Amino acid sequence: MYVIGALLLKRAAENGADLWPTLRLCNYAAAMFFCPLWMFGGQLLSASFWLQPLAVALLFIAGQVLTLFALRIGDVSVATPVLGLKMVLVAFFTTILLRQHLGAHLWTAAALSSVAIAVLNANLATAHRHVTLTILMSGAAAASYALFDVLVQKWSGAWGMGRFLPITLGFAALLSMALRPRQREVSTAKPAQTSGWVLGGAFCLGLQAVMLVSTIATHKNATVANVLYSSRGLWSVIAVWAIGHWFGNRERHLGPRALTLRLLGAALLTAAILLVLLNPHQG
């Protein structure tokens, strides 16, 4: 779902879709998907605790802004694998903020995924523009999302999933209304050229967000969830080659060396995921 959403939003950007309206629509869609979680119940804490969902909402918005910038200036097959660094950062923040001991297999999986990301991007610098900036923005987005996940795990228990998550994404939607550049972008795109791509991308990103975040809030294991979630780097490579042309994506023309590196990276990611699947109760 994430990779399809990224391809749709990349196509929207290439058609001239403005960044800030796209961002607002993505956050509105996410808030809509999180609303039904209210039925899972919980409690509303006193006013002093409301800074918790507000802070987490700001991290969510920061991650969205940085991700959309990365997709706008760079390639899906660069940005998405680099976002997999989020998993390593989740393990780090979990240790620091939650004081949890993580098993050796999880640290090994995190290390394998990091190597996989490096391999996936090893041959891109000669074939694409803005690679360094794309990697930096994607890495910063990964840090924002990682801290978001860990704080959801830390704070959602007192509120209950049915209160903390809808309120957090509600804050994100409200704050998004104020996200306007000082000088508005001038777009030459016609609504018909961009609206379908933006709506589709917002729908996919909102749906995958509620699946991942509600899983973390329920099972309280952000590290395992993100090791499995890092497979989106693999799916991004497969999608770019297999169906990228459906979205007007031109990344499939990279050559045999890049394909070999992608396959090696995919194998490393698969090994990391198997480590988690085979050790579900450790760590």
Image: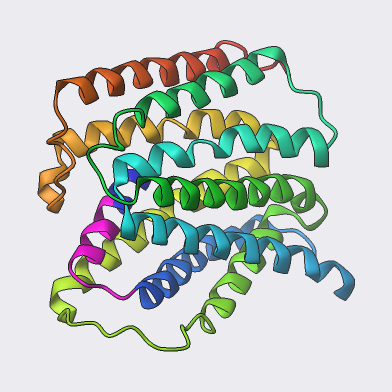
- Above or below 233: residue 57: below
Magenta-span inclusion, residue 9: yes
**Left or right: 14 in relation to 104:** left
Total labels: the figure holds 0
Q: Quadrant of the N terminus?
A: top left
**What kind of secondary structure does the magenta stretch mostly adopt?**
helix
Q: Quadrant of the C terminus?
A: top right
**Residue 267, how many percent across, how many down?**
37, 15
Q: What's the magenta region?
A: 7-18
Does residue 222 show up? no
Q: Residue at x 59, y 78 (%)?
A: 175
Q: Residue at x 54, y 84 (%)?
A: 178
Residue 218 or residue 148, whichever sits in front: 148
**Residue 251, how many percent across, how many down?**
18, 41
**Residue 262, how many percent across, how many down?**
29, 24
**Left or right: 90 in relation to 251:** right
Q: Farthest residue to the front: give it.
A: 126
- Above or below 279: residue 40: below
- Above or below 220: residue 170: below
Q: Residue at x 14, y 73 (%)?
A: 193
Magenta-span inclusion, residue 225: no
Residue 132 or residue 220, whichever sits in front: 132
Colouring used for the render? rainbow
Q: Farthest residue to the bottom: give it.
A: 183
**Left or right: 158 in relation to 218:** right
**Residue 276, how many percent across, how many down?**
57, 18
Does residue 35 show up? yes
Q: Residue at x 31, y 38 (%)?
A: 125
Residue 211 or residue 199, whichever sits in front: 199
